Image (tube, helix red, strand yellow):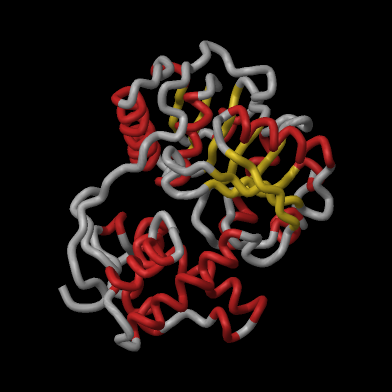
Amino acid sequence: MTPPGTRAVTTTHPADPSAGATTRSAPPASLPATVGVLGGGRMGAGIAHAFLLAGCRVHIVERDDAAAGHARARVDADLERSAARGRTVPDADTLTAGTDLTAFAGAGLVVEAVPEDRVVKVDALARIEEVVDDAAVVASNTSSISIDALAASLRRPERFLGLHFFNPVPASALVEVVTGAATVPEVVQAALNWVGAIGKTAVVVRDAPGFASSRLGVALGLEAIRMLEEGVASAHDIDTAMERGYRHPMGPLRTTDIVGLDVRLGIAEELERAFGARFTPPALLRQLVAEGHLGRKTGRGFYEWSDR
């Protein structure tokens, strides 16, 4: 195909980083017995999968029954892939997916994983705080929105922080623990313990636009899109230059397809407001999003994807 992508690809799934480990019948002492996830899209389902494999009970809450059913199906599919890689998966009754927020009552941790929109997230976090215990930790999976801005309307901002998981969650090894001005040290330490207990590596980042990973990743991704737009090289060759020349495991355009072009656009717009023109989204990115070509999840972005 011609730009934005010059060749079709078939996706492959990286090895499960925790393959070969044994799932506990109960979570280790460092993990909460019950975890809630608000939003069961690709990210929310992946977060639920990670805590289920670690032995937690998980409650996913979605906007309606159909969305809850899709969320359940996503998690079940992830669990099946884990089982195929040799993991022992939990019983089906350790996961619920529904529409009632009171399912979060008694959860030690609730992760908000709704779309990357400030207004939507503020509303979601307020609704979570209404039903959880005072001792619960509430986290946002935001990849760019200020933790302090999200905490401003919360009654217990000291028990709130960012837990930025990466897509696809089952194959990723990193979680950014993003601390707000009010986040107390014991909540940060608990988050670090939880990330380690689910088999991932944590980095601690002070609240700042784009945190560490999104700010760096989007800067590289936007420049790659500009190069494609200008005809400097094909999508495949731009990615290969970074993969072979700089040992990146995946090039910036393929990464953008996996993250989602709409997600990358939203992050870029957030960073443009904070830092100015260096994060202005390229016209090609806006065009593809407007046309509905969002990457892997829609079957086409800078590449064509036959495995979604």
Q: Is residue 223 left or right of residue 148?
A: left
In the figure, 132 relative to 29: above or below?
A: below
The image position of residue 188, as x and y in percent, is 76, 40
In the figure, 101 relative to 145: above or below?
A: above
Residue that sits furthest to the top in the current view: 25
Residue nearest the viewer, comparing 53 with 148:
53
Q: Give the residue displayed 18% in from the left and 77% down from the top.
A: 2
Q: Give the residue displayed 44% in from the left and 31% down from the top.
A: 97
- Observer able to see residue 269: yes
Residue that sits furthest to the front in the current view: 245
Q: Give the residue displayed 30% in from the left and 86% down from the top.
A: 231
Quarter occupied by residue 14: top left
Residue nearest the viewer, comparing 245 with 273:
245
Quarter occupied by residue 276: bottom right
The image position of residue 109, as x and y in percent, is 65, 33
In the figure, 284 relative to 171: above or below?
A: below
The image position of residue 267, as x and y in percent, is 53, 67
Residue that sits furthest to the left in the current view: 1
Q: Is residue 188 left or right of residue 76?
A: right
In the figure, 210 relative to 297: above or below?
A: below
Residue nearest the viewer, comparing 103 with 50:
50
Q: Could you tell me how many numbered marks the image carries?
A: 0
Q: Give the residue displayed 64% in from the left and 55% down from the top.
A: 122
- Observer able to see residue 126: no
Quarter of the image with the N terminus is bottom left
